[in-house]
Image (spheres, rainbow, N blue to C red):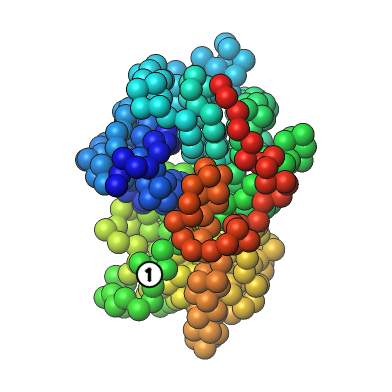
């Protein structure tokens, strides 16, 4: 029965439904996993008007919810308070007295002792008296992302982003010190954090992303969304996210002309919600920008190849796993390949530089048999290592509940450090 399950607080920086962008895919699957073993009390924010209609759907997995609407423009101004307080700007952006009060009330009234926070800024709600077990899913080392942004910007943005990286790293370290476990999406991200906070190494673990291989499957039949013409290259993702904007802008302007010099009728389709003005401006000769689509799978299923030319990327990209699950050949740059358990040249194509990226795309477009064999290998790779149920079983272990899936303790995803240290209990 539901009330035989212990209550649990789950905090996310964005409403985890629908799972239509990278971070929401992960946070939604975590929600489903937690709901199998706990009565979930969800605290979150909704930052897009289209998502508000989906709040009632969360009742399928949550006993109670507190969803705080935020307007990004206003929040960006509010986040500047961090400059006066000497803190990371990301923290006041996601600070809400209403949510903080709700968290404390739920912890007190329902005797909640365990909490899982998704993304670093949500850790500011984990100090509620009464919580005894805290797990933070950082996903990526966000502080490193801001530092990387700074390298590509001019002053004053370069200064602001570098400052954000420094302040956010300090917060991440403080957060990890008071949590029982800090999780990252790849071993590379975990190692990066261990290097920055070596004293916390035994409390750092890896919980990889997964993919719904039944939903993203080549067995489904879809009509082609593409008009007749040459081979299609696809990039999918939320197109108001800067790393995606940077990726498609660079590809369309710098790489596509070189590819079309050898495959003149090649077409590039940018598929994803909320295309920024810089993305919309790319539409034209050989480039199509779709905006929001009801289902990305037809675009993947009928693509000749999927490209992920990200120059700024942290962790395993859901867009890559989804394309591989659909048995499509994928060409990706080195950044999104970090941590991906795939063999270059068999399961996917990993390009070290622009010249290699173009050569690998052209090679695939000119060899149908290779596209087919790589697509099959890609799906096999996903089935081997990227099951959500298997990868999220880490949470059962950390929260000390009976596993939701069969398997011995040896089946728990690899964690560096002594398990008792990783799962130590702290009382607020």
Q: How many marks?
A: 1
Residue 302 in sight: yes
For image coordinates 44% across by 56% down, the residue present is: 404
For image coordinates 67% across by 51% down, the residue present is: 415
Q: Quadrant of the C terminus?
A: top right
Residue 162 in sight: no
Element carrying mark 1:
loop
- Residue 271 locus on image (x, y percent): 38, 58
Q: Quadrant of residue 295?
A: bottom left
Report the front residue among 248 and 130.
130
Report the front residue among 368 and 31.
31
- Residue 108 locus on image (x, y percent): 39, 21
For image coordinates 66% across by 29% down, the residue present is: 177
Crowdedness of circle 1 by 10 Å Cα count: few (<14), some, many (20+)?
Answer: few
For image coordinates 57% across by 62% down, the residue present is: 408
Which residue is identified by label 1?
214
Does residue 360 sit above or below 239 in this rendering?
below
Does residue 341 sit above or below 206 in this rendering?
below
Does residue 115 sit above or below 387 in this rendering?
above
């Amino acid at each position: 029965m539901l009330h035989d399950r212990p209550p649990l607080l789950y905090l996310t920086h964005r409403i985890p439904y629908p799972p239509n962008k990278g971070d929401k895919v992960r946070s939604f699957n975590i929600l489903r996993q937690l709901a199998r073993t706990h009565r979930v009390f969800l605290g979150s924010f909704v930052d897009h008007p289209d998502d508000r209609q989906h709040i009632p759907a969360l009742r399928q997995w949550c006993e109670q919810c507190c969803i705080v609407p935020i307007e990004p423009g206003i929040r960006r101004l509010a986040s500047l308070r961090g400059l006066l307080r000497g803190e990371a700007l990301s923290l006041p952006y996601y600070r809400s007295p209403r949510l903080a009060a709700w968290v404390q009330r739920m912890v007190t009234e329902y005797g909640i002792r365990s909490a899982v926070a998704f993304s670093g800024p949500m850790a500011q709600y984990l100090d509620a008296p009464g919580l005894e077990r805290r797990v933070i899913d950082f996903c990526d080392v966000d502080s490193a992302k801001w530092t990387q942004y700074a390298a590509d910007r001019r002053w004053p943005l370069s200064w602001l982003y570098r400052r954000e990286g420094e302040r956010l790293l300090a917060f991440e370290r403080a957060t990890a010190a008071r949590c029982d476990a800090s999780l990252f999406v790849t071993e590379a991200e975990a190692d990066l954090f261990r290097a920055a906070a070596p004293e916390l190494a035994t409390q750092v673990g890896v919980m990889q992303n997964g993919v719904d291989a039944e939903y993203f499957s080549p067995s489904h039949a879809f009509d082609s969304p593409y008009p007749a013409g040459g081979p299609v290259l696809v990039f999918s993702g939320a197109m108001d996210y800067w790393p995606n904007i940077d990726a498609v802008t660079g590809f369309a302007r710098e790489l596509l002309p070189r590819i079309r010099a050898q495959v003149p009728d090649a077409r590039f389709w940018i598929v994803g919600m909320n295309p920024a003005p810089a993305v919309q401006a790319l539409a034209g000769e050989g480039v199509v920008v779709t905006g929001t689509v009801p289902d990305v799978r037809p675009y993947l299923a009928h693509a000749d190849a999927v490209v992920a030319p990200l120059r700024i990327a942290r962790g395993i990209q859901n867009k890559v796993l989804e394309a591989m699950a659909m048995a499509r050949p994928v060409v990706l740059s080195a950044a999104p390949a970090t941590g991906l358990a795939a063999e270059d040249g068999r399961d996917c194509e990993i390009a070290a530089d622009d010249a290699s990226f173009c050569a690998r795309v052209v090679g695939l477009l000119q060899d149908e048999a290779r596209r087919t064999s790589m697509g099959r290998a890609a799906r096999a790779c996903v089935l081997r290592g990227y099951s959500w149920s298997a990868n999220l079983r880490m949470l059962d272990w950390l929260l000390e509940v009976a596993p939701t899936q069969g398997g011995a303790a040896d089946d728990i995803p690899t964690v560096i450090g002594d398990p008792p240290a990783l799962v130590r209990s702290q009382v607020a």
